[in-house]
Image (cartoon, rainbow, N blue to C red):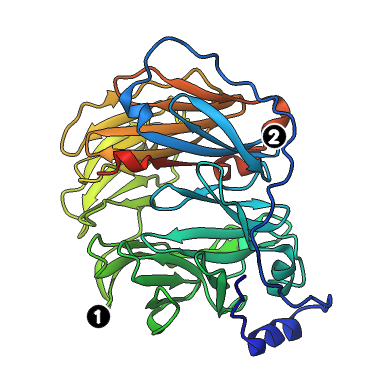
Amino acid sequence: MNNRLWTLPFIILLAACQPQTSPSVPPTLEASVTPPQPEQTETVPPATDIPLPSVYRSIQVAYTAQEQLWLWENGGSIPLTSANPDTPPVFSASGDQIAFIRDGELLVIHSDGSSERVLIPAQEMTAIEPQNPARLVQFSWVGGKPLLLVSTLEDSGIGLQPNQDLYILHTDTDEIVPIFPAGQGGLAYPSPDGAWLAVVSKERALLMKSDGSEEKARLTYSPYQSGHFPYIPKPYWAGDSLFFLLEVWSEEFITIWKIPVEGEPSIPYETSMYRGLSFSPDLSRFAYILDDGMLDSPIELHIANLDGTDDMVYARATHEDYTGLGFLGWAPNSQSFLFTDTGGMIQWMKTGESEAQAVPMPPVEPLRAIKILWLDAGQFVIIIRSPSGIWLSAPGQESLQIAGFSEGDFVASDLARSFDIALMENFLP
């Protein structure tokens, strides 16, 4: 039995700032009993005698459907436990644990279906946010450590928006440490080595150790309104964890800041003409979509060096035939990338070249959510969730359907939140 490390002044502060609902004292936790599982009616593709390609055998997929958390691997899906069907399951870095949500509680389970336990029970969610204890939470693992970053979301009436709070959850001890109350933190992004957190809000970027210590301000900027909501920049960490890049918007310019762990921030590049920016893993280049809004001007996919030099057009679309030109992601070596063409098909192209290779796509509806897992610089798996089910695609392989859904299983607003993909432990490089 493990006790929580809640600081009393923090809970009092939350209670004073929110309508009172008499939240109970967070209880100590013990391993929960797995609830009874309802009869499974999920439609899955029939088994065949065709050997499963090794690229598909190298991965596992967690997804939610029919009030269940499912795991697919080696050609078959099994139900692990009950879960909310429209909320995210998230693999740990090693793929051996899955964090998920059920009835407003945050839980974790091993990928073999064992050792399920509650990490944040409903009573503690009430203590975190008394105003709306049923709200969902955002959570992500810190690579290589038994840590989850947890924050809450607010239903604005238009959509779910981050409350800009932050909690660090130690999954090995059940200790939850409050770092920022609502409105005083931001969105947290861990460094690749798990040592640092970049915490960004609409007006500042902070840096701190991954345990919440050694907080220091790194950059402040003016808020930028994007549609109905303030824009929150996204940091991109260098592979050696020594610095991150930050894209900051203003009315006139988009500024790329380089923010080191030690030393002063600098500006490698400033522009006013792009959207959909995506940095390469080595942070030497960025991709962007150029669209000046004029009907007689093309929409273009560009890639340029970090300082703006060697800017090259890789794909074009007109406003008449534009249906989905967009950048999907970089290869780990920063030498090739994936993008969607004007017909919504996925293309694979090397930087500096003009010919793309089409990636086989399943015959699914246009509405789909996509995640990409690179096994190495030349091999990857694309996971696609559509209203009819989940599919896998890979270069040189036929698409494989791993799950089928009935109409009632599909929640369009949470399409991209309801699955995750991981490399199996025995395939780790």
Left or right: 221, with 355 as reference point: right
Left or right: 213, with 133 as reference point: left
Left or right: 360, with 313 as reference point: right
Q: Is residue 386 above or below residue 117?
A: above
Residues 112 and 417: in front is: 112
Left or right: 412, with 191 as reference point: right
Q: Residue furthest top?
A: 49
Q: Is residue 75 above or below residue 247?
A: above
Q: Secondary structure at mark 2?
A: loop
Q: Can residue 282 be spotted in the picture?
A: yes
Q: CA distance from mark 2 to mark 1?
A: 49 Å
Q: Residue at x 42, y 22 (%)?
A: 361
- Mark 2 lies on residue: 66
- Whichever of labels 2 and 1 marks the residue nearer the N terminus, that label is 2
Q: Quadrant of the C terminus?
A: top left
Q: Secondary structure at mark 1?
A: loop
Residue 313, quarter of picture: top left
Task: Provide residue 226's location: percent of width, then percent of height.
Answer: 54, 60
Q: Amino acid at mark 1?
A: Glu
Label at residue 262: 1
Q: Residues within 10 Å of mark 1 (few under 14, many from 20)?
A: few
Of tags 2 and 1, the one toward the viewer is: 2
Task: Provide residue 299's location: percent of width, then percent of height.
Answer: 38, 38
Residue 293, quarter of picture: top left
Residues 3 and 86: in front is: 3
Task: Provide residue 238's location: percent of width, then percent of height.
Answer: 26, 62
